[in-house]
Amino acid sequence: IVEEPGSKPTVRPPYRLSPPELADMKKQIEYVLEKKLIQLSTSPYGAPVLFTPKPDGSLRMCIDYKALNKLTIKNRYHIPRIDDLLDQLRGATIFYKQDLRSGYWQIRMADNSIHKTAFRTRYGS
């Protein structure tokens, strides 16, 4: 995560959450801590947590990085056109399919960016 020169760490207070959201947040955070997908932090950065409903009615925990995104230098890499990609597959006979369930947790973040993605809850960062 490359920020604009001279930018200061972004920190936002936790959002107000309902009792069911608070209970679910505690459970989800305990799970990802146990799996070592997150760690406790003393980072000067901090983004608030919010929830969105999944199709099955359960809650998806999300982190609001809007403040950090405003300071981030955008990657100007162009995504390839789908028709160009399909042209490259012409004549291929072997294809690979990958399920990216929980894909967010599958991509390693650069060590020098980890502290910028800290999030805040009423239970700490």
Image: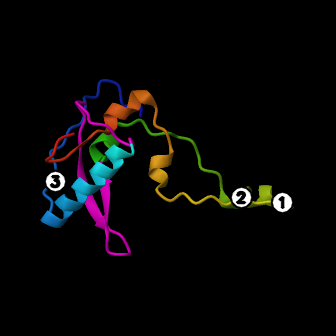
Q: Nearer the viewer, residue 110 or 11?
A: 110
Span highlighted in magenta in the image: 36-64
Badge number at residue 16:
none
Q: Is residue 84 above or below residue 5?
A: below
Tell me which numbered mark, 3 or 2, is placed earlier along the sequence.
3
Q: Is residue 24 above or below residue 14?
A: below
Q: Position of residue 18 (x, y in %)?
A: 14, 64
Query: Callout 1, which amino acid?
Result: Ala
Tell me which numbered mark, 1 or 3, is placed earlier along the sequence.
3
Q: Is residue 50 magenta?
A: yes
Q: Could you tell me which secondary element the residue under label 1 belongs to?
A: loop
Residue linked to disc 1: 92
Residue linked to disc 3: 15
Is label 2 or label 1 in front?
2
Q: Give the distance between the C-alpha atoms of the residues marked 3 and 2, in whole angstroms.
A: 41 Å
Q: What residue is shown at x 29% (from left), y 24% (from top)?
A: 6
Label 3, residues with CA under 10 Å away: few <14, some 14-19, many ≥20: some
Examine the rendering and report whether any part of residue 54 can be seen: yes
Badge number at residue 96:
2
Q: Give the distance between the C-alpha atoms of the residues marked 2 and 1, in whole angstroms.
A: 11 Å
Q: Is residue 57 magenta?
A: yes
Q: What residue is shown at x 22% (from left), y 54% (from top)?
A: 26
Q: Nearer the viewer, residue 26 or 88?
A: 26
